[in-house]
Amino acid sequence: MNSLRLLFENCPIWVEIQNKSSDHATLVVAPSLAGSVDPVHYCLDLALTDKGGVTVREQPKHRRFPEFCMERHINPGGTFCLEYGSEDRLGDIDAANRWWSSLETFLHNQEYAAKHGEWPLAAGLSHGEAAIEQLAMEELAKPLGWTDELLGGMFRSRGWLAQKLPRATKKLDRVVNARSPCPRGCTWKHKSLRKNSCETDSCETGCRKPHKPVLRANCPNRQIIEEIVLREHRRRAIEAAIVADLREKKTQCCGTMKNCPLREDMAG
């Protein structure tokens, strides 16, 4: 069974298929939106790809979103990037259900982006192969409770991950100068809190002693910190290459997002 037929046979109740063939479909979807009394209707085109996956885009005559916006995960040509690998072949019912769920979330996120001028932080996803680096970073950060600070650095330009990173080798296989302070800005606390210096910002109540920075060489999470730094170097490089390619092609910014790297080109 091809991916498109699998979607047809497992579509949720908020999907109305208007026309369909073995490799194409037009449909109207109306998932419920939080805070909205009446559902919003979206007119979409689905198409089977040469690799067996499915692309989805708005019908040109019924467009609510920009035709292209990298920050809203709408590709050149109008196809949606629902998640990393969303155009891969669908192998079973669970994969089809996940695809529909990703589409629903994507549409919710579009409404949020239209209202706030930024993509929801928890749904932030880097572009192209940079997403692989991001997802690996999140796996490293999750056990330590650092996920929010990573997302904040990548998508809101705040915190240590948005700052200048520790230097790495040209091959991006090693972080150099381990005697420099840990990039998270941790400082050694006193007495009973010393072992928890990387987990708390404040020291004991009433402590007024100076706090020395934790050097990366002495950081209890050194290996994870350095792996995150290396992957962030790679993620930034991939993202920069994507933006450079779009600029070379004179791709226009839609102007709907606050922090789009192409937005500054509009003034030129």
Image (cartoon, rainbow, N blue to C red):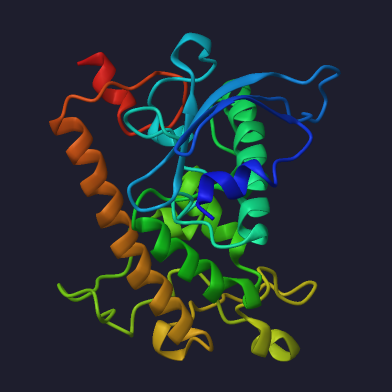
Q: Position of residue 195 (x, y in %)?
A: 66, 90
Taking 16 as reference, is 106 left or right? left
Residue at image coords 67%, 33% = 108
From the viewer's side, name the closer residue of 183 and 251.
251
Q: Position of residue 59 (x, y in %)?
A: 48, 18
Q: Position of residue 227 (x, y in %)?
A: 40, 78
Q: How many marks?
A: 0
Give the residue at the far right of this rendering.
Answer: 37
From the viewer's side, name the closer residue of 252 and 37.
37
Residue at image coords 53%, 76% = 140
Residue at image coords 13%, 32% = 248
Q: Is the residue 121 above or below the residue 14 in the image?
A: below
Q: Position of residue 91 (x, y in %)?
A: 54, 62
Q: Is the residue 235 above or below the residue 18 in the image?
A: below
**Corner quadrant of residue 134:** bottom left
Q: Is the residue 212 above or below the residue 31 in the image?
A: below
One can see residue 184 in this view: no
Taking 40 as reference, is 135 left or right? left
Taking 90 as reference, is 233 left or right? left
**Corner quadrant of residue 77:** top left
Give the residue at the far top of this rendering.
Answer: 61
Report the quarter where the N terminus lies: bottom right
Residue at image coords 32%, 85% = 178
One can see residue 152 in this view: yes
Q: Is the residue 175 above or below the residue 98 in the image?
A: below
Report the quarter where the C terminus lies: top left
From the viewer's side, name the closer residue of 61 and 180.
61
